[in-house]
Image: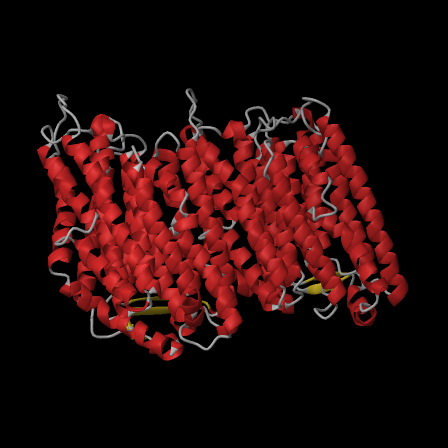
């Protein structure tokens, strides 16, 4: 059963398809929680699977299985974060979970695909499900429809550009298998044509990662979609996109200077743009959207080194990014009463209303800003070290300056919840499982900050298998 | 690589790790306690246990070697050559003692002053202690950096939650200023790593780096440390943070956090980039002099007691950097003594302000004037620490400033001449403050004098003022060997 996790997610979606046909919808959320946890367990159990399927178009190895575990864990956490008040019409609940499952399925397939056509198909499976769930939100205004349309159009355009690039790749090498493209294409990478083709192909990945210049969708879609949907979009697709990015980017080598320089420019612009625009945001989800754009830039620092250590640090960074963003979004979901968007002012007095949530927010904000002893620091440290090692001093300095810039708005989150007082506040009671989510996320963030070597080794091993 | 610098631990247990993690364990314990008094007592006991442990540490300290003692070495992230390396020498032993001494004092001084969120407050204090001891013990760049930055978070929270009216502004400014410096520190650390291949601090010392490399690394280090000290153009975060922080926060800031900057100069800049240090020494000396004189003048016009003491820190720390960059043995010793003196005296002065603030709820000099007849005991303590602050002979600061001046006059006579007026200014502003507080005006208010708890926590500092002022020999003996080694190594390289 090489693809048990994928099969299970299909089953997961089918179960919800049937629930959506029936009348009784009382226990949908609990069912979803149980089933998603099962998905996580199954994926963990399948981590040692290895093999190739479908004429070698689909490769199951440690590398892909690690990403699948991350995706399953992320899905599990997102569904556990889901609350009744999340601004979703009750009648759409089963469909909602069905599409979350389908989208995760697409993302899992994406991390295993090593052939261009299957990459496109997986990418589209995950995207189409998202196009459907973005407008599923109790109508406050027409924002969610606008968001959905934007995501659809931008997604379609980026896929189009990607297909264009894939066309070049195919026409130059005569194959759609990455393993066959690599040896042929390396000789072509010295020419403008090759760089052009590879960057066009990567555009689809950049779109998922919301890397500059494919970032335009992020703020509006984050703002328009419901809180849980945003949590999903902000984390899971980026995991799979990183997996794909690494598979495609290693077509080039560090000696292809023009390709590396292009990535350096994209990385620098992405973090600078994200952080500068992030400074003036009031809406928390918009703020995190710009933060995501900036972090995509940091992530590229690891990929653009095209060295083993650099890529390992990129994988490490996307892992910690997922957890710290999830922690941040969890606080946003919890403080919004009826699933509306929260602004910075809604955080005022949070440390009195709910000390645990305030602490979770503080830990994740410090981690996003990259302050030890959190994982955000350790991740950034590995990225900086490896980029420096390869001699890309420019991007290290840009990254360092950006780390300072970003402090302003991350610290603002902590500042609002700790040092601003309100005259009246009501104490928020957290139930046991909400507390557990907070503790788990905080533990992971600190653990990854203090003891990184175990995970680093696993990631490193996975690259060679 | 580390082992050749590192003398193994002479105790049967890893004493430095114990000293670092006792506060952390105490902090975690606090989470399981509901009763407020029990929380305070637990924090106090944790602090005292660590103080006793540090005395044990001191009793085992061998002053006859310049090597790092009580060494611990565990590989931490082997693929990057990062280790969990601890060890102390003559530079750090007293700084650790100062930290462990001040923690129980800070708990005691917050006993009644902190009324809300006592648990979180004590938690922050203990985490601070953990990180501060960690900074002084760490002999690995990454370990050092993690402790160095981790310190920011509890300090930020101390100011942001329990601070004065402008705490919001002060805490953000403090955080961003310090973080700005730290990022350059991180880049410099990575640069050194790429050259030496390891993150070990002793391993990076006294090597033949190229001049260009030294200059850039020195500048990156110097920005980080100059902000922390703070030296003249970077000092603006200090008055805000000191003034708005709660008493315990101000004491930690003044007594320990500022020392980390000068500690950094001694531990990193001089041994790792000696040639660049010599090149930049005149500029740092000029900045120190500006700091001394400017700090003194600004103090003269302050009406807020805490702000006055905060600016006086700028002037005092100017003497420390002056001593370090005189690049003489006397200068080094004076600088280190002055670091300890400033920690004792300024910490005590902040405690005194805290005591009066708790009674009158004002930090204005005018509101607290004329306490001589109402609070005789308080005025006695306050007077002692004030005269110690302007280096009255017989008190601790006198010895420190004397050593610094001896050092600076050796090679930089003009700089020495400029430092003298700074010392006079100190007398001017402290005496002005003292006069106002003691005899300022006729006051008929009923203010309760110091109680036993407050006297208890000021007495150790009081003893130190006299001990270091009248009989500094034991202190000098302990630090002499390490600083002497540093000085001789610098001489070899520079001449």
Q: Split into 4 quadrants, where in the image is the N terminus of chain A?
A: bottom right
Image x and y of residue A110, in percent = 73, 53
Q: Split into 4 quadrants, where in the image is the C terminus of chain A?
A: bottom right
The structure's colour scheme is secondary structure
| Left or right position of B167 against B103 | right
- Whether residue A40 is situated above or below residue B243 in the rendered picture: below
Does residue A235 show up?
A: no
The residue that appears at 56% across and 31% down in the rendered structure is: A83
| Left or right position of A210 against B103 | right
The residue that appears at 14% across and 41% down in the rendered structure is: B383
Image x and y of residue B364, in percent = 27, 30
Q: Nearer the viewer, residue A142 or A443?
A: A142
Q: Nearer the viewer, residue B145 or A167?
A: B145
Total labels drawn = 0
Q: Nearer the viewer, residue B181 or B115?
A: B181
Image x and y of residue A335, in percent = 52, 29
Does residue B244 show up?
A: yes
- Whether residue B274 is situated above or below residue A103 in the rendered picture: below
| Left or right position of B288 against A258 | left
| Left or right position of B99 against A118 | left
The residue that appears at 23% across and 59% down in the rendered structure is: B337
Q: Quadrant of residue A249?
A: bottom right
Image x and y of residue B303, in percent = 29, 32
């Amino acid at each position: 059963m090489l693809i048990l996790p994928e099969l299970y997610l299909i089953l997961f979606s089918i179960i919800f398809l049937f629930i959506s046909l029936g009348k009784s919808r009382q226990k949908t959320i609990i069912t979803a929680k149980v089933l998603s946890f099962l998905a996580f367990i199954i994926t963990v159990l399948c981590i040692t699977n290895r093999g190739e399927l479908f004429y070698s178009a689909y490769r199951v190895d440690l590398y892909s299985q690690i990403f699948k575990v991350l995706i399953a864990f992320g899905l599990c956490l997102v569904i556990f974060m889901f609350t009744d008040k999340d601004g979703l019409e009750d009648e759409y609940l089963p469909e909602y979970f069905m599409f979350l499952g389908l989208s995760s399925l697409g993302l899992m397939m994406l991390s295993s695909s090593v052939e261009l056509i299957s990459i496109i198909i997986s990418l589209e499976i995950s995207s189409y499900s998202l196009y459907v769930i973005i407008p599923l939100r109790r109508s406050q205004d027409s924002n969610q429809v606008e968001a959905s349309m934007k995501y659809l159009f931008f997604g379609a355009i980026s896929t189009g550009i990607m297909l264009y690039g894939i066309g070049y790749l195919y026409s130059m090498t005569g194959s759609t298998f990455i393993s066959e493209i690599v040896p042929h294409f390396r000789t072509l990478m010295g020419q403008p044509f090759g760089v052009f083709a590879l960057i066009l192909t990567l555009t689809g990945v950049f779109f998922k990662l919301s890397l500059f210049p494919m970032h335009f969708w992020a703020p509006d879609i984050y703002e328009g979609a419901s809180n849980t949907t945003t949590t999903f979009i902000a984390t899971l697709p980026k995991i799979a996109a990183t997996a794909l990015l690494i598979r495609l980017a290693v077509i080039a080598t560090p000696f292809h200077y023009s390709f590396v320089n292009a990535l350096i420019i994209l990385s620098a612009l992405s973090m600078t743009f994200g952080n500068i625009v992030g400074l003036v945001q009031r809406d928390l989800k918009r703020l995190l959207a710009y933060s995501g754009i900036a972090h995509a830039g940091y992530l590229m620092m690891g990929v653009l080194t095209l060295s083993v250590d650099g890529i390992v640090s990129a994988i490490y960074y996307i892992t910690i990014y997922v957890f710290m963003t999830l922690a941040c979004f969890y606080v946003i979901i919890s403080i919004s009463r009826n699933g509306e968007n929260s602004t910075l002012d809604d955080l005022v007095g949070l440390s009195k209303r709910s000390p645990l949530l305030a602490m979770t927010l503080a830990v994740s904000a410090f981690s996003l800003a990259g302050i030890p002893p959190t994982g955000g620091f350790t991740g950034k440290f590995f990225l900086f070290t490896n980029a420096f090692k390869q001699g890309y001093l420019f991007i290290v300095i840009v990254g360092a300056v950006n780390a300072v810039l970003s402090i302003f708005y991350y610290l603002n989150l902590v500042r609002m919840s700790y040092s601003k007082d309100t005259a009246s506040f009501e104490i928020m009671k957290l139930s046991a499982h909400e507390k557990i989510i907070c503790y788990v996320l905080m533990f992971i963030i600190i653990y990854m900050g203090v003891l990184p070597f175990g995970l680093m080794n696993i990631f490193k091993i996975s690259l060679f298998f | 690589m580390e082992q050749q610098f590192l003398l193994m631990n002479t105790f049967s247990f890893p004493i430095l790790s114990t000293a670092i993690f006792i506060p952390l364990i105490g902090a975690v314990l606090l989470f399981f306690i509901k009763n407020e008094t029990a929380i305070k007592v637990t924090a106090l006991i944790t602090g005292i246990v660590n103080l006793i442990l540090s005395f044990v540490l001191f009793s085992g300290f061998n002053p006859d070697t310049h090597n790092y003692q009580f060494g611990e070495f565990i590989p931490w992230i082997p693929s990057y050559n990062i280790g969990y390396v601890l060890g102390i020498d003559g530079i750090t032993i007293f700084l650790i003692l100062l930290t462990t001494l001040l923690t129980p004092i800070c708990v005691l001084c917050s006993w009644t002053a902190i009324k809300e969120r006592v648990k979180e407050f004590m938690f922050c204090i203990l985490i601070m202690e953990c990180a501060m001891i960690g900074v002084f013990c760490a002999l690995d760049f990454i370990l050092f950096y993690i402790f160095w930055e981790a310190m920011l978070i509890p300090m930020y929270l101390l100011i942001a939650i329990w601070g004065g009216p402008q705490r919001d502004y002060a805490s953000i400014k403090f955080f961003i200023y310090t973080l700005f410096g730290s990022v350059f520190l991180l880049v410099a650390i990575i640069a050194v790593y790429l050259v030496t291949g390891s993150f070990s601090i002793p391993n990076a010392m006294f090597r033949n780096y190229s001049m260009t490399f030294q200059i850039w690394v020195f500048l990156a280090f110097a920005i980080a440390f100059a902000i922390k000290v703070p030296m003249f153009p970077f000092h603006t975060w200090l008055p805000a943070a000191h003034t708005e922080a709660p008493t315990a926060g101000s004491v930690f800031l003044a007594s320990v956090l500022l020392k980390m900057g000068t500690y950094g100069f001694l531990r990193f800049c001089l041994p790792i980039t000696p040639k660049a240090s010599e090149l930049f020494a005149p500029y740092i000396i000029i900045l120190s002099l500006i700091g001394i004189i400017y700090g003194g003048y600004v103090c003269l016009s302050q009406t807020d007691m805490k702000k006055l003491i905060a600016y006086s820190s700028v002037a005092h720390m100017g003497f420390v950097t002056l001593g370090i960059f005189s690049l003489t043995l006397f200068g080094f010793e004076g600088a280190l003594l002055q670091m300890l003196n400033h920690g004792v005296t300024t910490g005590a002065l902040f405690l005194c302000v805290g005591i009066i603030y708790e009674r009158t709820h004002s930090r204005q000099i005018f509101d607290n004037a004329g306490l001589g007849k109402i609070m005789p005991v308080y005025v006695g303590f306050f007077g002692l620490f004030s005269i110690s602050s302007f280096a009255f002979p017989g008190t601790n600061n006198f010895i420190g400033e004397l050593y610094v001046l001896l050092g600076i006059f050796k090679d930089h006579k003009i700089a020495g001449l400029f430092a003298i007026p700074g010392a006079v200014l100190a007398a001017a502003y402290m005496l002005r403050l003292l006069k106002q507080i003691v005899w300022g005006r006729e006051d008929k208010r009923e203010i309760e004098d110091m109680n036993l708890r407050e006297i208890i926590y000021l007495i150790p500092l009081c003893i130190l003022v006299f001990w270091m002022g009248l009989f500094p020999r034991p202190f000098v003996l302990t630090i002499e060997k390490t600083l002497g080694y540093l000085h001789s190594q610098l001489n070899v390289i520079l001449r």
